[in-house]
Image: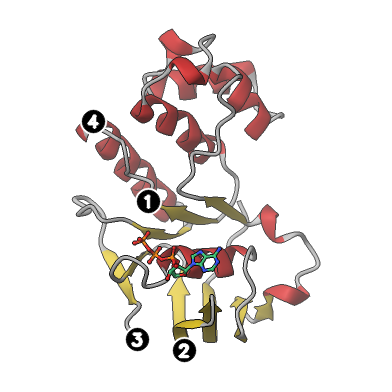
Amino acid sequence: MQSYVSLTLSNISIERGERDLCKGLSVVAKFGRLYRIVGENGAGKTSLLKVIAGLLMPVEGEIYLDDRAIAAQVNPWSRDCLYLGHQHGVKKLLTVEENIRCYCPNASAENIHKVLTQLGLLPYQDTSVKQLSAGQAKRVALSRLWLSNQAIWLLDEPFSSLDMKGSALLEEKLEQHLGHGGLVILTTHQALLRVDAQLIELTL
Ligand SMILES: Nc1ncnc2c1ncn2[C@@H]1O[C@H](COP(=O)(O)OP(=O)(O)OP(=O)(O)O)[C@@H](O)[C@H]1O
């Protein structure tokens, strides 16, 4: 994993469907910390995550990784940034293991076994995702975090559908990522029990 100091959102304005979602938002997000985007339904939390992920263009503003504008990055942004949207992003007709192999084609059999064990998915390794519960399918989607090399995790509602054990497991993983110098920016309607969150408030 590459090491960085900060991700800076500078004067970001986002508009969707001719509605302003945020105007002139500036945040310096430090690596090693977790940022939680807060705001009511429709405030623009998902939209802001998509802007940071490079999936949506802001009407103005710039994003910098340390002192380099992301647009000017030589390496693809995906090398540093893992975005998990609140759609599961799992292929329902594939098995659990096939999904994980799609996400991480270079993962060793040993690592995949480890991740399946940690996420309680080992008994479902060869089961197609369409036969899983919502929480189990969410665990498949989240397996990317266990195999990720990216420093920046952008997570839209990562706790949704997870039971208490799954939520604790995910928080532990986030804590570990921060401890390794990673940066997490997420949305969640759930209280975080283990990790301190800095808030990015979206209010217009
Ligand atoms: N594809 C789209 N085209 C036009 N407008 C959109 C589109 N997607 C979302 N919007 C609008 O953008 C606004 C912000 O949506 P967004 O999903 O970012 O909010 P949110 O804060 O994540 O909401 P929630 O808490 O309900 O998940 C909403 O008013 C929504 O109607």
Task: Tell me the tag on residue 23.
Answer: 2
- Which of 2/92 is in front? 92
Task: Tell me the tag on residue 157.
Answer: 1
Quadrant housing residue 144: top right
Q: Which amino acid does label 2 sit on?
A: Lys
Reading the chain from its start, which is encountered first: label 1 or label 3?
A: 1
C-alpha gap between disc 2 and disc 4: 38 Å
Q: Is mark 4 on a helix, strand or loop?
A: helix
Reading the chain from its start, which is encountered first: label 2 or label 4?
A: 2
Q: Residue at x 24, y 32 (%)?
A: 163
- Which residue bears the numbered disc 3? 204
Tell which residue pokes out farthest to the front in this image. 17
Q: Which amino acid does label 3 sit on?
A: Leu
In this view, 180 is above or below 11: above
Reading the chain from its start, which is encountered first: label 4 or label 1?
A: 1
Q: Which of marks 4 and 1 is in front?
A: 1
Q: Is the residue marked 1 within 8 Å of ligand 1, measured from its CB?
A: yes
- Which residue bears the numbered disc 4? 165
Q: What element carries label 2?
A: strand
Q: Which amino acid does label 4 sit on?
A: Lys
Q: Is mark 3 on a helix, strand or loop?
A: loop
Q: Residue at x 28, y 64 (%)?
A: 197
- Name the quadrant of the C terminus: bottom left
